[in-house]
Amino acid sequence: QVQLVESGGGLVQPGGSLRLSCAASGNIFSMYVMGWYRQAPGKQRELVATRTSDGSTNYADSVKGRFTISRDNAKNTVYLQMNSLKLEDTGVYYCNVEGTAWVTGKFTSWGQGTQVTVSS
């Protein structure tokens, strides 16, 4: 079983910055894709950014140039640096990991979510 623990959410003013972290633990053999999704009130969950094990990244158009996803493979951790935050960035941010675990094989895991609120 793979567990994801997120941290770093909070309240920030428009134009501010936050850094989210997501640490994976468990019987992990490899992690192909680590990413972040978000869900605003009354809306569906949407992709924010992903990063593959070979370094390829993918960003939602709405966050390009403002958010940066990175990962520390040694720590099994993925980060999301969020700059120039806007009101519309408000939501619950979820970490997602796809990979392979020892014995049990392929997995997809979600974190519990961390609230990001952008407000003046």
Image (cartoon, rainbow, N blue to C red):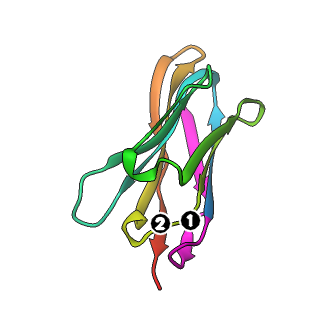
**Marks 1 and 2, how far apart in space?**
5 Å
* Image location of residue 106, percent across then percent down: 47, 18
56 vs 110: above or below: above
Task: State the image quarter where residue 74 is shown.
Answer: top right
Taking the view exactly as shown, the residue that stands out farthest to the front is 65
> What amino acid is at disc 2?
Gln
* Image location of residue 90, percent across then percent down: 41, 67
Q: Which residue is mark 2?
A: 115
Please name whichever residue, 92 or 103, is drawn nearer the observer in this view of the structure: 92
Q: How dense is the environment of label 2, judged by Cα within 10 Å: few (below 14), some, or many (20 and up)? A: some
From the image, which quarter does the N terminus lie in?
top right
Please name whichever residue, 47 or 87, is drawn nearer the observer in this view of the structure: 87
Q: Is residue 18 magenta?
A: no
Taking the view exactly as shown, the residue that stands out farthest to the bottom is 120
Contact, mark 1 vs mark 2 (Cβ under 8 Å): yes
Q: Is residue 10 magenta?
A: yes
- Residue drawn at x 56%, y 25% as measured from the top left: 56
Taking the view exactly as shown, the residue that stands out farthest to the left is 42
> What amino acid is at disc 1?
Gly
Which of the labelled discs sits on residue 27, or is there none? none
- Residue drawn at x 33%, y 47% as measured from the top left: 46
First in sequence: mark 1 vs mark 2: 1
- Residue drawn at x 45%, y 81% as measured from the top left: 119
Q: Which residue is mark 1?
A: 9
Element under label 2? strand
Element under label 1? loop
28 vs 92: above or below: above
Magenta stretch bounds: 1-17
102 vs 59: above or below: above
* Image location of residue 88, percent across then percent down: 36, 67
- Residue drawn at x 54%, y 76% as measured from the top left: 11
Q: How dense is the environment of label 1, judged by Cα within 10 Å: few (below 14), some, or many (20 and up)? A: some
